[in-house]
Amino acid sequence: MSIIEGRFEPNIIITSVDALFNWSRSRSLWPITFGLACCAIEMMATAASRFDQDRLGIFPRPTPRQADCMIVSGTVTAKMGERVRRLYLQMPEPKWVIAMGSCANSGGPYWQHGYHVVKGVDQIIPVDVYIPGCPPRPEALLDGFLKLREKIEQCTIAKKTG
Amino acid sequence: MTPEEICQKLQSAGIEVTYHDTKPDPFLLCTLQSYKQAALTLRDDPDLAFQSLMSLTGLEWPDYFEVASQLISYQKEHRVTIKVRCGKDDPSVPTLSDVWTIAEWHEREAYDLVGMTFAGHQDLRRILLPEDWEGHPLRKDYSPQERWHDISLTSEPPKTTHE
Ligand code: SF4
């Protein structure tokens, strides 16, 4: 028999700190959005009523200070890359990054001749989930978020995340 | 007015332009000396009345640089393309920014990407690329730089690991 059995009201829930943190973090992912090119249109569609990412607790934020994750959707140029990194560094820990589309993954169509394109945002900041496609459909972005949820659920407060 | 009539109108005003009947769009070619005068006449002549500059583009050809400008008159409902050429040893053409103000940004773009200069331009800085960028990317002899500050621009995987 448990030592706390019968000592409290019946409406008490017992959990581990890890499980509580991971549940709350993975169920309210607030991304700062980086719509840098055509992929941004699909990202906006994901936020709009038809795909409604808000039903998963995903709610775009205008400032890095309020964000848990960053969606880099589009072509990252060198000039913008510095800004992407600066805003990433301004996000509070723990933080995650989703690279959406071929451009953010690897430079995409500008892989070879893009003189000013960073060949993948992972050259600048660490990326957790890569979503392929040019552009990925909104379903793919939602799937990326579900993958990120799975990843967050593996986190523990004993180790640094992000 | 058709481009050919516009050309005749300019020529009758004593401005040195030639008509080139290229397909699909003909153009008027000015000399470096007649360029500014042609632009002013196109804007101010009541029969021409080109109030608006739609685009201005710098181009590099094997033997010369070229600036192509597309003009439209909403009042007269006609449009025309004017061009001017300059040698590769001195890639400088007169600015149109004092005729149509929007040319200021278009000329900055042409300077940024093609590397030609515009004599008389008040503020000829790069407009798209960072100010410390090396070279002008749309030049035929351009070779891309591999890094900009600490950002790698090659397709190599990153060498440093992130925390
Ligand atoms: S991956 Fe394709 S759709 Fe997305 S930003 Fe790049 S070019 Fe545009």
Image (spheres, coloured by chain):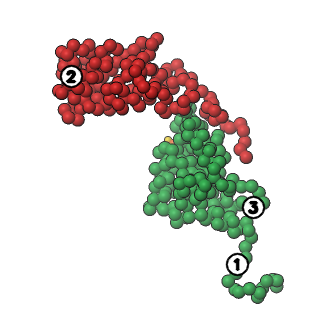
Chain colours: A green, B red
Image position, residue A12 (x, y; %)? 70, 81
Are tags 2 and 1 found on a single chain? Answer: no
Q: Left or right: where does residue A25 sit relative to residue A5?
A: left
Marker disc for residue A13: 1
Numbered disc 2: secondary structure = helix
**Residue visible at 30% across and 15% down in the picture:** B34
Are tags 1 and 3 found on a single chain? Answer: yes
> Mark 2, residues whose alpha carbon is within 10 Å: few (<14), some, or many (≥20)?
some
- How far is disc 2 from disc 3 in space, using C-alphas? 75 Å
The type of residue carrying mark 3 is Ile
From the image, tell me which residue sits under label 2.
B6
Image position, residue B126 (x, y; %)? 49, 29
**Residue visible at 60% across and 47% down in the picture:** A87
The type of residue carrying mark 1 is Ile
Image position, residue B78 (x, y; %)? 22, 31
- Which one is nearer the viewer's eye here, A25 or A120? A25
From the image, tell me which residue sits under label 3.
A157
